[in-house]
Amino acid sequence: MNRNQITLDQLPVGRKANVTMLTSDGTTRRRMLDLGVVGGTEIEPLYRSPSGNPVAYLIRGAVIALRSDVSKKIVVSVS
């Protein structure tokens, strides 16, 4: 990973980033691809639950909640 790349679970609420790659495989990878989480997709964390897991993300106009074990497998590029 470059220094401007982090995993999605590290992205602060309100900060936008673009997907660089998925490191997951199997059904989790397929689900992310079906939701539109592909290279170049802009993602913004909107809300964190009180416990910090899951987090609601704005992805392609839809609000989708992801657990931290899934968001750790999505690498994003921040500017």
Image (cartoon, rainbow, N blue to C red):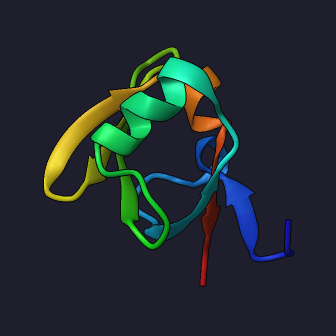
* Picture mark count: 0
Which residue appears at 74% of the width and 68% of the height? 5
Closest to the observer, 21 or 59: 21
Does residue 36 sit above or below 67 in this rendering? below
Image-quadrant location for residue 78: bottom right
Closest to the observer, 29 or 5: 29
Does residue 34 sit above or below 13 in this rendering? above
Which residue appears at 57% of the width and 36% of the height? 71
Q: Position of residue 75 (x, y in %)?
A: 66, 55
Q: Quadrant of the C terminus?
A: bottom right
Q: Position of residue 73 (x, y in %)?
A: 66, 38
Q: Position of residue 4 (x, y in %)?
A: 75, 76
Does residue 55 sit above or below 63 in this rendering? above
Residue that extends furthest to the left in the rendered view of this protein: 61
Residue that extends furthest to the bottom in the rendered view of this protein: 79
Q: Quadrant of the N terminus?
A: bottom right
Locate residue 51 relative to residue 64 in the image: left or right.
right
Which residue appears at 15% of the width and 47% of the height? 62
Image-quadrant location for residue 55: top left
Locate residue 76 relative to residue 46 in the image: left or right.
right
Which residue appears at 37% of the width and 58% of the height? 44
Locate residue 18 relative to residue 64 in the image: left or right.
right
Q: Position of residue 24 (x, y in %)?
A: 65, 33
Does residue 48 show up? no
Does residue 78 show up? yes
Does residue 6 sit above or below 26 in this rendering? below
Locate residue 28 relative to residue 23 in the image: left or right.
left
Image-quadrant location for residue 20: bottom right
